[in-house]
Amino acid sequence: MKRVIPCVIAIMLLSGCGSLAKLKMVGRAPKMSPAESVPSPALQTSLGRQGSADRAGVEEKVPVPVAPSASLFRTGAGAFFRDQRAGRVGDILTVRIKIDDRADVGNTTSRSRTGSEKSGLSALLGLESPLTKFLPGSVDPSKLVAADSASKSDGSGSISRKETINMTIAATVIGVLPNGNLAIRGKQEVRVNYELRELVISGIVRPEDIARDNSIPHTQIAEARISYGGRGRLTDAQQDRWGQQIYDALFPF
């Protein structure tokens, strides 16, 4: 009992920290995650931005290297005859997520077993007679042991699941594998009032599977990890309280 009380106190303190964090968010919308830095190769600035000011009228602080020639095309710039599909680190491609999965599983099991055992010792050189001194009541040597058993088990199970997700997200190439496959990652957050919806996707794609419009379906992404969830008032209301979660985790009944 002395060990249980400190554990309960520690759990209450830890849960109190989470409650304090929730109290700080009363009346506030959930914060969005900061944009993650995406690796991309350095590209030369186009001639149209050399020595020119931006729309706000502030001169660019980054020094612009001198162009080796007067060509309008630079490394990494779009070209009319070049393939515009993603193929290098930092490129962007569109991932079309269309999940419409259904699973129906039904199992039925029935088992029945009956057993009966009987044994006796009607005559054994007269040694069966002294049994009346050791066993209570009247003893019939021909029916010394009798056992009957019967068992029956019936079981049935059914699983029905349906998942439907239809979304589109832009992902970024974060790496090129030695065999030429592309490692991609994409994240999208949408906040409506006090609920924030988050969509995260990552995986490996083949450049050959990317369509001409620079898009790829989720079914052609290897090691795909798709997460669609949210944070906010509605999500908190759908979850059990921490006390109920602890009870369900500790108590087996």
Image (cartoon, grey):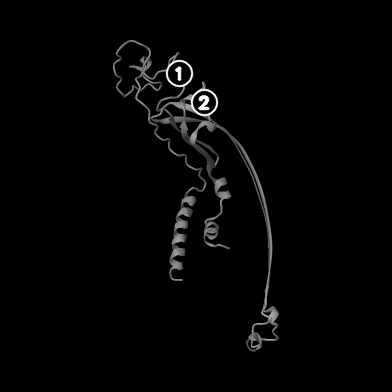
Residue 139: horizontal and vertical position, in percent? Answer: 69, 84
As drawn, which residue projects farthest toward the top? 70
Q: Secondary structure at mark 1?
A: loop
Q: What residue would you read off at disc 2?
A: 215
Residue 111: horizontal and vertical position, in percent? Answer: 68, 58
Residue 146 seen in this snapshot: no
C-alpha gap between disc 1 and disc 2: 13 Å
Q: Indicate the amino acid at tag 1.
A: Asp
Residue at 47% across / 64% down in the picture?
A: 8
237, 144: nearer the viewer: 144
How busy is the neighbourhood of tag 1: few (under 14 within 10 Å), some, or many (20 plus)? Answer: few
Q: Indicate the amino acid at tag 2.
A: Ser
Identify whether 189 is placed above or below 112.
above
Residue at 36% across / 26% down in the picture?
A: 41
Pointers 1 and 2 in contact (C-beta within 8 Å): no
In the figure, is residue 201 to the left or right of 166?
Answer: left
Identify whether 209 is placed above or below 160.
above
In the figure, is residue 107 to the left or right of 185?
Answer: right
Q: Secondary structure at mark 2?
A: strand
Mark identifier at residue 121: none
Residue 71: horizontal and vertical position, in percent? Answer: 35, 11
Looking at the image, tell me whether mark 1 or mark 2 is earlier in sequence order: 1
Residue at 47% across / 28% down in the picture?
A: 206
**Rendering quarter of residue 99:** top right
Identify whether 25 is placed above or below 13.
above
251, 104: nearer the viewer: 104
130, 135: nearer the viewer: 130
How busy is the neighbourhood of tag 2: few (under 14 within 10 Å), some, or many (20 plus)? Answer: many
Mark identifier at residue 83: 1
